[in-house]
């Protein structure tokens, strides 16, 4: 089943069929099912964990799929339903506000999440209306109780009276400006639409691409794999239908299914990692550093994906990675990720990266500082993230980002290189942070990062791709990847040389 419906001439989604063709179950409510199928129950459990317990959808759903022993077909359905409902929650809630006779905040949260799943099936999946209603009402009966089942049935019947496009047109007509119109159609908060459109413009792309970007954020991402150099192999994945990656070496795009069954994933020599993140690690290893003594660092190493690849690359160059993570839990994940790499290639520290200059002043040759950020570049993979972030988070994170970049430069020896990276294209987390720090110091020079990215990528992968490059003074450049252009997370990176 696909989350994508048919589209009109403007590229907007339409529902599967005309209103006159819709059908509903002839059964009376009391005759309908009193429980849900395993796939829908799994999606419901995931949504409750995310909205009720602040869990992360991309972490909790795979666990539930395995716990509930879903087969491949049911796992795919549960994934599309759960992630789709999370991504489009803002839009579906706006629909529900027209169909519920009270403010949504007054609904039982369990009932509200069930309604979101029902709306997603009606308006964004090729599920017959009667099946969507019957299954959702049965889910509520089994998980919440008989009382709310009538409410759910009545509300979803109201939802089904209009097609997807009719609902979107109505919701758009109620908005006061273009940002809110785009936000309700593509299910993004208006402030994020504004920030992403500005980021497109500031990176040299057309702001008119904003709809393509928002739509890409709503599309299920391809799963990227990486084989740690000289440690892992993608042969088994390729034999099972994965395709070779087009951006970086030792990478592939999964053909689907449970990637954790691919040989190498259990011992960590093959990992799930976005190709943009893979490129970040390879760029740091690619930048020339004269008299490199092999002292590399990752200041924000959790949960360990980039750290494990960096450590493997460091081992190839007879270097050693100093991996740091402030959170005990995430440090455990880093240690698990690094376990696949020979211990001679890494050391783990648990602590605040801002304190490292006091322990190791001006000692590193290469430093990655992949700072904590809003994650607006990974909205495809973190479906609930768009609803958890606020503009206040940007300001709060900005101070931390500046302090970490300063610490990284203070810990780097003259001639060494710091690679600043974020999984956010928001200019307040990228261009503004780097500008403020570099302009405040006389020992920092921005390098031609785009050149090193082309060198680190597969031959020709970024050649002539001006969309990824942004020129800085004195020959410097930064790189901004985009989901709708490169098929990766919206990773930003810029290399800075520490001068004497």
Image (spheres, grey):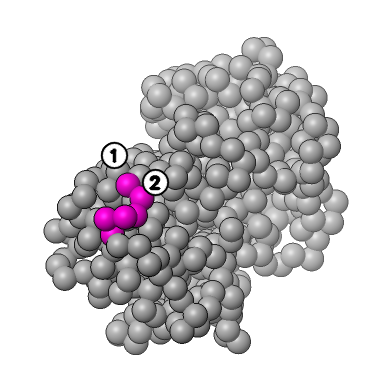
Measuring from the top left, give residue 337's x and y in whole percent: 58, 24
Q: Residue at x 85, y 51 (%)?
A: 459
The residue stretch that appears in magenta: 29-34
10 Å neighbourhood of mark 2: few (<14), some, or many (≥20)? many
Q: Nearer the viewer, residue 428 or 218?
A: 218
Examine the structure image and report whether residue 95 is included in the region drawn in magenta: no
Whether residue 108 sits left or right of residue 311 in the image: it is left
Q: Which mark is on residue 104?
A: none
Circle 2 residue: 36
Please tell me in which quadrant of the rendered image residue 137 appears: bottom left
Q: Residue at x 71, y 36 (%)?
A: 226
**106, 491: nearer the viewer:** 106
Report the disc number at residue 53.
Answer: 1
At x 40% / y 32%, what residue is drawn? 354
Q: Tell me if residue 478 comes above or below residue 334 in the rendering.
A: below
Residue at point 71%, 30% (across, down): 262
Residue 15, percent across and down?
Answer: 50, 76
């Amino acid at each position: 089943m696909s989350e994508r419906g048919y589209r009109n001439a403007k590229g907007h989604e339409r529902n599967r069929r005309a209103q006159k063709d819709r059908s509903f179950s002839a059964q009376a409510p009391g005759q309908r099912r009193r429980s849900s199928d395993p796939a829908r129950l799994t999606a419901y459990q995931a949504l409750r964990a995310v909205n009720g317990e602040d869990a992360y959808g991309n972490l909790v759903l795979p666990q539930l799929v395995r716990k509930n022993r879903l087969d491949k077909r049911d796992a795919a359905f549960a994934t599309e339903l759960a992630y789709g409902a999370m991504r489009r929650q803002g839009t579906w809630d706006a629909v529900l506000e027209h169909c519920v006779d009270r403010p949504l905040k007054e609904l039982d949260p369990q009932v509200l999440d069930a309604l979101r799943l029902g709306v997603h099936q009606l308006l964004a999946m090729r599920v017959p209306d009667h099946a969507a209603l019957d299954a959702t009402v049965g889910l509520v009966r089994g998980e919440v109780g008989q009382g709310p089942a009538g409410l759910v049935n009545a509300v979803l019947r109201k939802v089904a009276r209009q097609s997807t496009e009719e609902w979107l047109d109505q919701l758009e007509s109620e908005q006061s400006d273009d940002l809110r119109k785009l936000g309700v159609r593509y299910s993004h908060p208006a402030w994020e639409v504004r920030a992403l459109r500005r980021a497109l413009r500031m990176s040299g792309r057309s702001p008119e691409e904003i709809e393509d970007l928002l739509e890409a954020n709503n599309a299920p991402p391809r799963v990227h794999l990486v084989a740690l150099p000289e440690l892992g192999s993608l042969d088994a994945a390729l034999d099972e239908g994965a395709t070779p990656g087009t951006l970086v070496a030792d990478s592939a795009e999964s053909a689907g299914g449970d990637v954790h069954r691919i040989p190498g994933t259990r011992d960590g020599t093959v990992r799930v990692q976005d190709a943009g993140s893979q490129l970040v690690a390879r760029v740091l290893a690619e930048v020339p550093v004269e008299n490199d003594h092999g002292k590399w660092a990752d200041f924000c190493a959790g949960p360990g994906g980039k750290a494990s690849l960096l450590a493997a690359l460091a081992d190839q160059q007879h270097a050693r990675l100093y991996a740091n993570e402030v959170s005990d839990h995430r440090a455990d994940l880093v240690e698990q990720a690094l376990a696949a790499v020979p211990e001679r290639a890494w050391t783990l520290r648990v602590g605040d990266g801002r304190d490292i200059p006091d322990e190791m002043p001006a000692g590193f040759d290469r430093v990655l500082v992949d700072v904590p950020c809003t994650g607006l570049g990974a909205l495809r993979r973190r479906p609930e993230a768009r609803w958890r972030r606020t503009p206040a988070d940007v300001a709060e994170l900005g101070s931390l980002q500046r302090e970490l970049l300063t610490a990284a430069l203070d810990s780097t020896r003259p001639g060494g290189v710091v690679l600043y990276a974020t999984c956010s294209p928001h200019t307040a987390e990228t261009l503004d942070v780097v500008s403020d720090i570099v302009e405040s110091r006389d020992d920092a020079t921005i390098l031609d990062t785009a050149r090193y990215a082309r060198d680190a990528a597969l031959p020709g992968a970024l050649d002539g791709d001006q969309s990824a490059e942004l020129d800085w003074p004195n020959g410097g450049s930064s790189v901004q990847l985009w989901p709708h252009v490169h098929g990766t997370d919206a990773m930003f990176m810029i290399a800075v040389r520490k001068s004497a």
